[in-house]
Amino acid sequence: MGMLNNRMNLFVIIVGLLLFLLPFIYESRTLLILLTQIFIFAIFAMSYDLLLGYTGIVSFGHAMFFGIGAYSTGIILHRMESTIFTVLLSLLVGILLSLVISILVGFLTLRLKSHFFAMLTLAFASLFLVVAEKWRTLTYGNDGFTFPLPEFLRDRTYFYLVSLTFMIAIYFLLKRFTESPFGKVLVAIRENERRVESLGFHPLYYKVIASVVAGTTASISGSLYVLSLRFVNTSVFTMEMTLDALLMTIIGGVGTLIGPIIGSGLIEFAHHLLTDLASISPIFERWIIFFGILYILTVIFFPLGIVGTIRNRISGKGKKEKYAKKTVAG
Amino acid sequence: MEPILETKNLTVQFGSHIAVNNVNFMVYEKQFKSIIGPNGAGKTTLFNLLGGQLKATSGKIYFRKEDITSLSSVKRTRKGIGRSFQMTNVFPNLTVFENVRLAVQSRMNIRYPFFKHFSHYTEVNEKTYEILELVLLKEKQSVLAKQLSHGEQRKLEIAMLLALDTEVLLLDEPTAGMSMEEVPAILSVIQNVKKEGNRTIVLIEHKMDLIMNLSDAVTVLFNGQFLADGTPEEIMENETVQNAYLGGLYNGSPS
């Protein structure tokens, strides 16, 4: 485990450094914007995987926290002057709101069994969507609103670097989190919740804390997302957001942190390429069809996703590695 | 001597079916007690009541004279009542080591730290090795639990229970569904635990002959009712028990 882990960390650090250097070597606005988008969705997908892959909770309402972050940032920058300080304030407000709401919603919903829980989260997310649509004085309803950015973040290169830093920091923080004794209990809950109980752990508390961490992380990605668009509307609360995270996580590999990042890269790139192809044939405008097919194929043939499948191959070969405590969630 | 675990008129009812009927049962500290009885006698149901997996319809359960009838299974485990399950109940996609490590972690009260790497808790890892050695699973530690044979899974189950280090061990048919070659290994594990002499053990068993020389006392259940209690010799001699086992026609009235 130690060896594999170190190699993995090294790999992440090298790729990270290369990505840091990229804007200075290769100047392409489109690519920078695309990569920024990938980083932001990678954060969102990682937070989702904490629930889906590690704890085994299927939530259909994760966009709720994404949207809370998005609207916190949007409204604060719209109402107050835009400085670095207000941007940080808006991030913080989003995190705090998500914290409170995830605790409340968590204690209300996480007692329920899987599909009942999923339905209830869907209902909560819809509730937020309706509020965002109807509270027009604050949100301007469906149309949304634009807001100014502080000087510093208007530069695409800087914003790219900020998003990258956020993604890498969150990756390592969540990695620590999932490999702690706490994280190990989360994986055990995914495997057999009743058994966890008879070992003397309280599954509900663990699930609530997991959803708090996932919620606050999602809120950060929501804030970054609207900062990149300089615009916010109700789409941040929609089911499609949650489904995007679900798709990225499943294609990349559930129960890993690198999986959602790869998934986010693939989906965003594919999206970009397919929209470019729209001039060739109108079917490419309906890119969602392709994602649907991809999703079905992944679930049937690679249920572990890209990372999971590769990891299985490797550990299949190197099984003799002694002391290889390779739990599914390494 | 005070009983460590005691039930008073314990009853549980599923619809019109009374699975456990007015059972008064007690275990003394450091005793090795077996519960026997034919299929459907309510042995496992009684365990579910003791372990907190089921709520009693009426009656009381006492642990060290404290009423624990309404406590959850989590609280009971922390108080010192650990149980194993008849149906193998482990974490299938985790390694043997990780399965036991989780139980040790719970025992050592490491519940919510979320930053330090789990392998840096050396005392947890050492204790885990110790227990794996005791139950003869050391070679299998990096195998996923679902890849173990049935007998090995039963051993893992016992290992997890031992890791919790509870005062009372409730063992639900540790040899269930096992091939005859595997049974002696389990029995020697149980004997090892008994030899340490610091635990109270309650064992459910179907095969009477297996446990007669291990047990200090035996309780017999039949159709959810308490039938007899005594030393293994007394039970062997007991006519009602013989009728229950041989005839299977016991109608509940003392003969």
Image: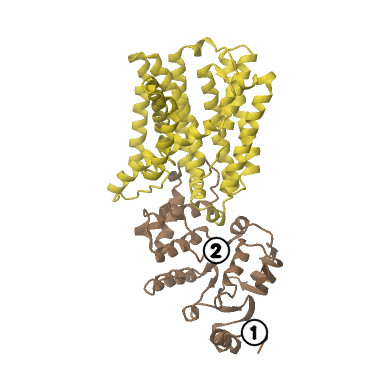
Chain colours: A yellow, B brown
Residue at 39% across, 45% down: A300
Residue B207 vertical placement versus A156 (above, below): below
Q: Is residue A180 visible?
A: no
Q: CA distance from mark 2 to mark 1?
A: 31 Å
Q: Is residue B59 left or right of residue A235?
A: right
Residue at 45% across, 15% down: A158
SS assignment at label 2:
strand
Residue A185 vertical placement versus A77 (above, below): below
Characterize the local packing of mark 1: few (<14), some (14-19) or many (20 or more) Cα atoms within 10 angstroms: few
Residue B141 vertical placement versus A231 (above, below): below
The amino acid on which the numbered mark 1 sits, given as a three-letter code, is Asn
Q: Farthest residue in the top direction?
A: A151
SS assignment at label 1:
loop
The amino acid on which the numbered mark 2 sits, given as a three-letter code, is Arg
Of residues B26 and A160, which is closer to you in this image? A160
Identify the image quadrant of residue A230: top right
According to the image, label 1 marks what residue? B251
Query: Mark 2, mark 1: which one is toward the viewer?
Result: 1
Q: Is residue A91 visible?
A: yes
Tell me the number on the disc at residue B83. Answer: 2
Provide residue B38's location: percent of width, then percent of height: 55, 78
Provide residue A292's location: percent of width, then percent of height: 44, 36
**Image mark 2: chain:** B
Q: Farthest residue in the front direction?
A: A282
**Image mark 1: chain:** B
Q: Quarter of the image containing the C terminus of chain A?
A: top left
Q: Is residue B143 left or right of residue A221?
A: left
Q: Earlier in the sequence, mark 2 or mark 1?
A: 2
